[in-house]
Amino acid sequence: MHYIIIGAGPAGVIAAETLRKNNQDAEITIIGSESEPPYSRMAIPYFLEGKIKPEGSYLRDPVTHFSNLNIKVVQDTVINVDSATQQLSLQSGSLLHFDKLLIATGSSPTAPPIPGKELDIVHSCWTLEDAHKIIELAQPGSNVVLIGAGFIGCIILESLLKRGINLTVVETGNRMVPRMLNDKAGGLIKSWCIKKGINVKTSCGADSINKNSEGLCSVKLTDGTQLAADLIITATGVKPNTDFLESSDIQIDQGLLVNQYLQTSKPNIYAAGDVAQALDFSTGNHEVQAIQPTATDHGRIAALNMSGKEVIHQGSINMNVLDTLGLVSCSFGLWMGVENGDSTELYNEKDYRYLNLQFDDDVLVGASSTGMTQHIGVLRGLIESRLHLGEWKDRLIKDPTLVMEAYMGSTQELG
């Protein structure tokens, strides 16, 4: 039996380890397209600010871990998957045969449609290679423009500031992290960043990136503002890495459509992580969730099913936890609410505190918070358990901080 995993991120590594645990004799190969050993993108901010060296981002010890488990790691790029012959074509010219395949190729940053984006001072912040280029250009006193204030952009804010740069953030939405938080919570993050010395421009986009005859670069914004720039970082979203499958007959929508076992439309081919369009716990729809907790969950479950265990994927909860210069925010599940649902919120603008709860009948289905970290674990637990709160719902409507009491009270009533 030859298991091949395309993708050397968290989903791929967890899958390989799970496969080895359940099959001691199989041949297992991980194929990664980057020059680095398997690493975590979530560690890149620590590399940017100098807390770790590149090897500090590695998921496992590349010298001993994979060889000890008899897992082969290949640095190459898959350019075609033939599901009929069960063969992979690699950029190097090699052909590999698989018995079962896991596609865990992750996602890539989307390039914003801005004239001048091809200039050599424009970079995304997605790979270790990107991080090396950013470190080279983000020198003390340099002018840095960050286009996009979503999750990716906000996790690198602190790392950039610690390099002593002058930072401007440009976001087309009317608030920061608009896909994670509502107006009030996203507005708190904006005012917090301004307080910390960042120039934040929301409801505004980049119109063009320009370079004059003296070699100086600038960004022209849609409101007419011109910003001098020594480095421009684009963080405007990601898309699943499915381009190499265009000539295959595997079913693709937004990502690779998978069933409850994380199988694609081809029984011997599975998908996990950012590239998989799998069951969403809250909506019941098949959606792409480009977050690491979902990736690792997918990798484990897919590997178990590839080993013949028949483990059903119950759906992943959409969850984000973000630390923006020390202000922690989170959102879980249906944080924007449901039709005909009830909601409650606590808002303290002065102290940067916000809590929002969303209900469907007497079940908590979504939540978001800023500056109130004590509730994070309980909020997730309440949503995942689909616990009927009964009279505790009315108490939470009056005081949303009583989430721990509501959890304890409701579970005791069940007992």
Image (cartoon, rainbow, N blue to C red):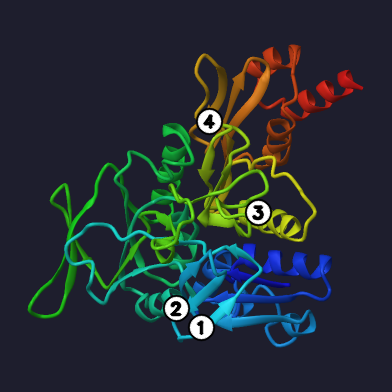
Q: Position of residue 378 (x, y in %)?
A: 73, 36
Indicate the quadrant where residue 2 lies. Answer: bottom right
Q: Is residue 202 left or right of residue 163?
A: left
Camera-nearest label, 4 or 2: 2
Q: Amino acid at mark 4?
A: Asn
Q: Amino acid at mark 3?
A: His
Q: Which residue is mark 1?
A: 35
- At numbered mark 2, what does the secondary structure look like: helix, strand or loop? helix
Name which residue lies at 49% across and 68% down. 81
Nearer the observer, 94 or 209 = 94
The first of marks 2 and 1 along the sequence is 1
Q: Is residue 410 above or below residue 109?
A: above
Q: Residue 298, which numbered label?
A: 3
Q: Which residue is mark 2?
A: 129
Name which residue lies at 73% across and 55% down. 305
Q: CA distance from mark 3 to mark 4?
A: 38 Å
- At numbered mark 4, what does the secondary structure look like: helix, strand or loop? strand
Q: CA distance from mark 4 to mark 1?
A: 47 Å
